[in-house]
């Protein structure tokens, strides 16, 4: 009896090793197809060079490192099929998810539909949709790979910019690479294409205006008033809005004596701007 158990165990282990090696072979094939060396894959994924070599040689790797490699090679879709949720015969109330999808509500970017998902109190947008819409690219995945090859700093922070989130596809819902607004603004700084030049100029202008507002906070107040005007508020409503914010800040803020003086100066400047409205 023990001999039978040992034999079955050895067969089971052989099957596991075969699966590991086959997986490593497929990953190596994808890496070569994308013209990435082991060193380049290591750099872009954040997995050590030794771990990449060991994995491709024998299939041994941690799940976290494997997911990083799959994300770099854009092959994460297959992970959704692992350990699929079993079909239950009884109804069970599941906890609320932090991800909220709205399949019928698409964000339109020019004439392209960009799939979006609300996650962790922020909107995230399908990365390949953005590239296709901005550049009219028919191969957005290859473009993003080339972009990371050229820009090493972008490759280093890539895992912090993107998330895998569920989106609708022709084959059903799958996890795709998504990016939020802040990440998008970082991404376009690495894109050399002329189609995004107006975005870069807008970012530069916005940064310059913020510096000017730090030097002279009265400019920030003027900008807020202009935004409220664009929203259709009257001058009196604008004054009320700003006064409410100012009153809230006054009650919440805890400052030193010098801080109180700075805040008093800010209040004086604010009053100079809004006082004429009352007359």
Image (spheres, helix red, strand yellow):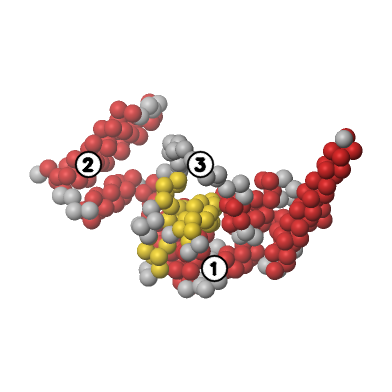
Q: Report the disc number at residue 241.
A: 2
Residue at image position (55%, 63%) is 190
SS of the residue at dot 1?
A: helix
Which residue in the protein does label 3 denote?
88
From this view, report whether residue 175 is shown above or below residue 93: below
Give the residue at x 87% y 35%. 1
> Residue 66 appears at what percent x and percent y?
69, 50
Label 3 sits on a secondary structure element that is loop
The answer to the question of whether label 1 and label 3 lie on touching residues, with beta carbons closer than 8 A, is no
Q: Circle 1 is placed at which residue position?
A: 140
- In three-dimensional space, the C-alpha distance between marks 1 and 3, rounded to whole angstroms, equals 39 Å
Q: Is residue 245 above or below residue 191?
A: above
148 displayed left or right of 266? right
Instruction: Categorize mark 1 by other alpha carbons within 10 Å: few (<14), some (14-19), many (20+).
Output: some
Name the image quarter holding residue 152.
bottom right
Q: Earlier in the sequence, mark 1 or mark 3?
A: 3
Direction front: furthest residue: 1
């Amino acid at each position: 009896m023990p001999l039978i158990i040992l034999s079955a165990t050895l067969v089971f282990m052989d099957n596991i090793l075969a699966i590991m090696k086959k997986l490593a072979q497929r990953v190596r094939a994808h890496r070569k197809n994308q013209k990435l060396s082991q060193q380049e894959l290591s750099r872009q994924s954040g997995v050590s060079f030794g771990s990449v070599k060991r994995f491709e040689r024998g299939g041994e790797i941690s799940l976290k490192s494997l997911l990083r490699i799959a994300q770099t090679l854009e092959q994460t879709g297959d992970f959704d099929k692992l350990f699929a949720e079993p079909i239950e015969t009884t109804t069970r109330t599941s906890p609320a998810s932090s991800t909220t999808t709205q399949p019928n509500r698409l964000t339109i970017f020019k004439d392209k539909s960009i799939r979006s998902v609300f996650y962790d109190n922020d909107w995230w947008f399908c990365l390949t949709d953005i590239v296709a819409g901005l550049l009219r690219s028919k191969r957005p995945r290859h473009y993003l790979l080339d972009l990371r090859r050229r820009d090493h700093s972008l490759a280093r922070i890539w895992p912090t910019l993107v998330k895998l989130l569920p989106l609708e596809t022709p084959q059903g819902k799958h996890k795709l690479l998504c990016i939020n607004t802040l990440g998008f603004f970082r991404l376009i700084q690495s894109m050399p294409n002329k189609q995004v030049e107006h975005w870069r100029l807008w970012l530069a202008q916005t940064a310059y205006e913020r510096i000017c507002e730090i030097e002279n906070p009265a400019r920030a107040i003027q900008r807020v008033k202009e935004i409220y005007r664009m929203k259709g508020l009257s001058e009196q409503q604008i004054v009320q809005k700003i006064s409410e914010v100012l009153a809230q800040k006054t009650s919440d803020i805890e400052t030193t004596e010098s801080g109180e003086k700075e805040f008093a100066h800010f209040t004086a400047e604010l009053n100079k701007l809004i006082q004429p409205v009352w007359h």
